[in-house]
Amino acid sequence: MDASIDVQTRGPARETRPPSLDFGAGPDELTGGELRVLRLLAGGASNREIASCAEISENTVKFHLKNVYGKLGVSSRAAAVFAAVQRGLVGGD
């Protein structure tokens, strides 16, 4: 029996939305806030400067950076900027 037919006879699919629709960032994609913090970081801004420019608290900056590090698989500011440049997330000027 064809596997696609067999799956259809077992009941409703577990995925309730069409897979082609975009419902936001996946677990490895940066959110808008994370990307903004990363871009400011790449420009050489400190946490305090990022917070001021983005109009968020320094704790929120730290939270975003922790998430950025995890999603990029890095453990430092310099490594995050390097990975972001390599992936085209920020300019490499």
Image (cartoon, rainbow, N blue to C red):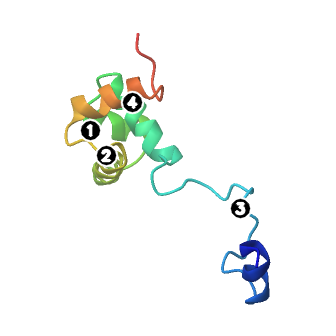
User: What residue is shown with label 1?
Assistant: 47
Q: Quadrant of the N terminus?
A: bottom right
Locate residue 91, reporting x and y percent: 45, 18
Disc marking residue 19: 3
Disc marking residue 65: 2
Dot in front, 2 or 3: 3
Give the residue type at disc 2. Answer: Leu
Q: Is residue 4 left or right of residue 46?
A: right
Q: At numbered mark 1, what does the secondary structure look like: helix, strand or loop? A: helix
Spatial distance from mark 1 to mark 3, Cα to Cα? 37 Å
Dot in front, 3 or 4: 3
Please, which residue is most extreme toward the left here?
76
Spatial distance from mark 2 to mark 3, Cα to Cα? 29 Å
Local crowd size for mark 4, using a 10 Å CA cut-off: few (<14), some (14–19), many (≥20):
many
Mark 2 and mark 3 residues within 8 Å of each other at the beta carbon: no
Residue at 31% across, 54% down: 63
Give the residue type at disc 1. Answer: Asn
